[in-house]
């Protein structure tokens, strides 16, 4: 079912130059699923050379032809949903239903950019005199180095690959070592759809070594990263040496503000469904819950009830609603965050530990913490897991200051039926995306990204393709 993965360079799947591999671990059993190749410097250089050749060819492919090829890639991904979703569930632990939905979302990215590639519009500028003409065109930036995370192993690379190809760029994609197979299937779909073999290359191995060598090369002109804030800062440093274009979606710590004019039980139901999706390992997962003090009791009680009722297990099992954490690091962090919060006066309303009966795998019970002080680590650091810390507030200015106090600005959420309150709140929240009475923000047709230390640039929507394009201005005198 799961297979060992090689590198894909110029359309050829192969072992690394020295044959080195590393295991991919099943987070539900802690047993090896397969292995990935560990790319050497020679392999990286081969991928760079291939991408350079692929770019020279792909950039000359017309937008209608590019669009048709990307549409075929979307169709192939959808046709292979069961295979891709099964691989994804094995390597991440997420429930099969979530894996299927993510595969569909990855296909949506290719469909979206199949259409956007035909809408790369230039601009005609009215010249000051009749003897001149002025215009702006957009051209592909070049070879793109794309780094994706493990939590959405198909959707995250799809956002980068599809946008880059839509713009006419070539790509070298490096997926997370914990969950590489989903991304590999996207690469296969691209090649099978007709993307030139050298235009999409796939590397696995030591992330730091691969990033340093790719970004040191003048062939790479653009880097796209989904990852942590510390990794993003290191990539920025590397990119600065070559003055390369950068787009980044980094960490977040999304506040949820529940005002006093809503049904607290219904708000809790919406929040719980979003919080425990993918075991809480979602960049825009709601992670700090500020509930008006008059609603705290009903909101927290319903939230905890829902958390205790979730069925935990391996993602491929029928009826499972939440799988394991992706790795042992995440599991240890959850235990540390709960212990810290409790030591500062928080109370455990649900979960708070590894669930009974799970002696293997990186499982952590869906957890709800009540009366959590702002000084707790879980309120200051992104809890990339199934922990929901709830606290109270009294007035608008107080809660908005607390919600905006952190250096992160990816997503935020507001629950209010009052138009004026909701409007003020979504305008005042310092983040790149806001949901008002809504928790599902990510969609191909909307721009995804954050501000402050949560990143720069946007993926998706009409803005997404422009991160892979360079504007060129031309002025022509009609006669010399």
Image (cartoon, rainbow, N blue to C red):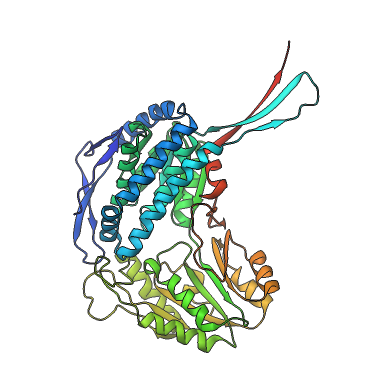
User: Residue 325's spot in the image, x, y percent?
Assistant: 32, 67
Task: Between residue 466 and residue 172, name the one nearer to us.
Answer: 466
Q: Name, please, the residue furthest toward the right.
A: 129
Task: Between residue 343 and residue 244, name the one nearer to us.
Answer: 244
User: Residue 55's spot in the image, x, y percent?
Assistant: 42, 30
Q: Quadrant of the C terminus?
A: top right
Q: Residue at x 42, y 75 (%)?
A: 387
Q: Name, please, the residue furthest toward the top.
A: 480
Q: Residue at x 51, y 66 (%)?
A: 253
Q: Quadrant of the N terminus?
A: bottom left
Task: Between residue 417 and residue 435, name the one nearer to us.
Answer: 417
Q: Is residue 402 above or below residue 236?
A: below
Q: Is residue 425 above or below residue 107?
A: below
137 sits left or right of 297 in the view: right
Can the viewer see residue 458?
Answer: no
User: Residue 403's spot in the image, x, y percent?
Assistant: 59, 71
Count of marks, rendered view: 0
Q: Quadrant of residue 434?
A: bottom right
227 sits left or right of 296 in the view: left
249 sits left or right of 179 in the view: right
Can the viewer see residue 26?
Answer: yes
Q: Is residue 144 above or below residue 179?
A: above
User: Residue 401's spot in the image, x, y percent?
Assistant: 64, 72
Q: Residue at x 34, y 52 (%)?
A: 176
Q: Quadrant of residue 334?
A: bottom left
């Amino acid at each position: 079912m799961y297979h060992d993965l090689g590198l894909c360079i110029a359309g050829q799947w192969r072992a690394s130059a020295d044959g080195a591999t590393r295991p991919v671990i099943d987070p539900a059993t802690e047993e090896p699923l397969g292995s990935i190749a560990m790319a050497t410097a020679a392999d990286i250089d081969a991928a760079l050379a291939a991408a350079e050749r692929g770019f020279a060819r792909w950039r000359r492919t017309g937008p209608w032809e590019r669009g048709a090829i990307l549409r075929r890639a979307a169709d192939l991904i959808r046709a292979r949903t069961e295979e891709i979703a099964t691989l994804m569930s094995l390597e991440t632990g997420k429930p099969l239903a979530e894996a299927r939905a993510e595969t569909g979302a990855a296909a949506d990215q290719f469909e979206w950019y199949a259409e956007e590639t035909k809408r790369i519009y230039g601009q005609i500028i009215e010249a000051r005199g009749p003897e001149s003409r002025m215009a702006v065109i957009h051209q592909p930036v070049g070879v793109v180095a794309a780094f994706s995370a493990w939590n959405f192993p198909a959707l995250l690379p799809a956002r980068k690959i599809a946008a880059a190809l839509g713009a006419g760029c070539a790509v070298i994609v490096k997926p997370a070592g914990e969950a590489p197979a989903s991304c590999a299937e996207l690469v296969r779909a691209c090649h099978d759809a007709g993307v030139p073999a050298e235009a999409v290359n796939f590397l696995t191995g030591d992330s730091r070594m691969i990033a340093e060598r790719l970004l040191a090369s003048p062939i790479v002109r653009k880097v796209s990263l989904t990852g942590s804030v510390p990794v993003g800062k290191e990539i920025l440093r590397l990119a600065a040496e070559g003055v390369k274009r950068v787009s980044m979606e980094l960490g977040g710590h999304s506040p949820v503000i529940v005002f006093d004019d809503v049904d607290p039980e219904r708000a809790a139901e919406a929040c719980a469904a979003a919080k425990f999706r993918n075991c809480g390992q979602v960049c825009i997962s709601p992670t700090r819950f500020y509930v008006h003090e008059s609603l705290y009791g009903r909101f927290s009680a319903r939230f905890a009830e829902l958390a205790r009722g979730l069925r935990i297990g391996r993602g491929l099992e029928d009826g499972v609603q939440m799988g394991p954490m992706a790795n042992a690091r995440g599991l240890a962090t959850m235990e540390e965050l709960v212990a810290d919060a409790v030591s500062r006066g928080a109370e455990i309303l649900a979960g708070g530990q590894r669930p009974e009966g799970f002696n293997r795998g990186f499982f952590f019970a869906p957890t709800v913490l009540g009366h959590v002080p702002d000084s707790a680590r879980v309120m200051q650091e992104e809890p990339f897991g199934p922990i929901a810390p709830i606290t109270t507030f009294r007035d608008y200015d107080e809660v908005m200051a607390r919600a905006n106090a952190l250096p992160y600005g990816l997503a935020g959420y507001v629950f209010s039926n009052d138009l004026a309150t909701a409007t003020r709140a979504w305008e005042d929240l310092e983040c790149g995306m806001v949901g008002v009475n809504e928790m599902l923000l990510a969609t191909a047709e909307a721009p995804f990204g954050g501000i402050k230390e949560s990143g720069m640039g946007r993926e998706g929507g009409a803005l997404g393709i422009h991160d892979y394009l360079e504007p060129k201005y031309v002025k022509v005198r009609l006669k010399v």
